[in-house]
Amino acid sequence: MHNSKYKSKEPPDEKEITDINSVPSSNKTSLRQKAEEILEENEAIALSHKLPNMHQPTNLADVDSQKLIYELEVHQIELEMQNKELERAKEQSQRSAEKYIELYDFSPSGYFTLSREGNILDLNLVGSQLLGKERINLINSRFGFFVVDDSKPEFNFFIETLFSTKCKASCEILLGSTGSNLPINLFLTGIVTENCDQCLITATDITIRKQIEEEINNTNIELQRVNAEKNKFFSIIAHDLRSPLNGFLGLSELLAEGLFGMTLEEIQKIALMMLNSATNLNHLLGNLLEWAQLERGLISFEPRSYYLIPGLKESLVLVLEAAKLKNIVIDFEIPENLVVYADKNMLESVFRNLVFNAVKFTSHCGHITISAISLPDNNLEFSVKDTGIGMNNTIIDHLFSLDAKTGRKGTDGELSTGLGLIICKDLIEKHGGQLKVESQEGKGSTFSFTLPSREM
């Protein structure tokens, strides 16, 4: 009988034999060779230790028994080798499964398995984070519950398309009920499973990309605005600034060539026309300079408390002269001791532009009222009201847009660039106020704004 360190056990059952026979012939031969090598090594070790139970077979029955034992021992070794191989395969499979789970859970995208009704059947960790709840609490929840109302039609169409066409589809949606203060933009890509009763969804957070796109779009809009303002600026320089200058030069030439043949009345009329042109030119140059400084951020904002009337009347000297030329009456309904909290230079510029604009569009013998009233919230409301030609709604809608040209001239043909009102709007907003306008064609206009009466 052969001796080995492996003890004889019960014969293998039919299942084990079947498992061995199911192994491919090449692998089975290799496995048997390895088993026989191990058995021979074990026998060699046993011989070297001169085990007492070893003896040579003496008859045929012993030989057959020994062969049977040999086969059983080889088969046992083969089974043990197969068992070890299965254990290694199992460990490798577990490691692969763990890696898959890690990749599935910690992927940068959310993965969802949805039913035809849109219920969540499975999802990864990132998916639960996108929806703002624990994964276990999201199973069997409707995915559409987390989609904002505006995006629900698109999401429903996306699900319907997946199951009806059985083709890959994608869409962009907005998540709202996620526990986050801000909505989340998602890009969804989906396919249906082989049995067509589920769909697999990949959800990518594109919120940052959307924000960048919006910033780029806003930048483009701002660039267009700046470009329009640049073009308007050049237009003012090329045309609006040149026109009053040409008029001034023409009057000077007429006066120089025909002075001795003119009456005193004619000379005075030309002089008044020259004064009007010079006033308009000075006002336009001042606005151009102030607007350029505003755009470049070169004007400092230094509000303080001061009496309004003394400085206001002084700043309106040239405007009051232009009003006299048209016999326009200007009334001040502002208390002499009124104190206002504002940047003095900016506020005087606002009044200068508003009153100059009122004079420009008011006919001869018209009336302009500059007033101030106290409001309950310690603010002051100022207004400049005229009896001029007024405006329709179309003009009002484009009143503060530099790239829109109304094409209107004053009642004496004065040019209008619209730049003064834009400067007023910017300066008032720096004070935290808002410029408002009420107007009716043929009846006049009222421009009003609010300022604090003291430092807040």
Image (cartoon, helix red, strand yellow):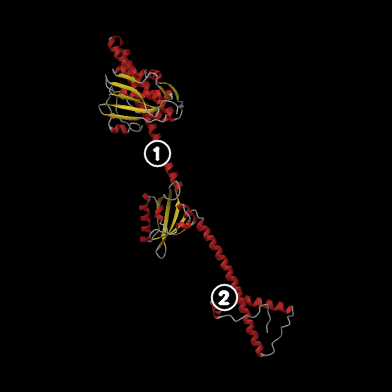
Q: Mark 2, residues whose alpha carbon is within 10 Å: few (<14), some, or many (≥20)?
A: few
- State the residue position of label 1: 221
Q: CA–CA distance between discs 1 and 2? A: 74 Å
Q: Is residue 334 above or below residue 133?
A: above
Position of the C terminus by quadrant: top left
Q: Position of residue 206 (x, y in %)?
A: 45, 49
Q: Position of residue 291 (x, y in %)?
A: 41, 27
Residue at 73%, 82% (x, y): give it: 52
Using the image as rendered, state which of residue 41 and residue 436 is in the foreground: 436
| Local secondary structure at mark 2 | helix
| Local secondary structure at mark 1 | helix
Q: Position of residue 327 (x, y in %)?
A: 28, 17
Mark closer to the chain start, 1 or 2: 2
Residue at 35%, 33% (x, y): give it: 403
- Residue 170 shows in the view: no
Q: Is residue 100 above or below residue 6?
A: above
Q: Is residue 106 left or right of residue 249?
A: right
Q: Which residue sits furthest left?
A: 442
Q: Mark 1, residues whose alpha carbon is within 10 Å: few (<14), some, or many (≥20)?
A: few
Q: Is residue 49 left or right of residue 435?
A: right
Could you tell me the amino acid type at mark 2?
Ser
Q: Is residue 431 above or below residue 156?
A: above
Could you tell me the amino acid type at mark 1?
Ile
- State the residue position of label 2: 26
Label 1–label 2 contact, CB within 8 A: no
Question: Which quarter of the figure has residue 397?
Answer: top left
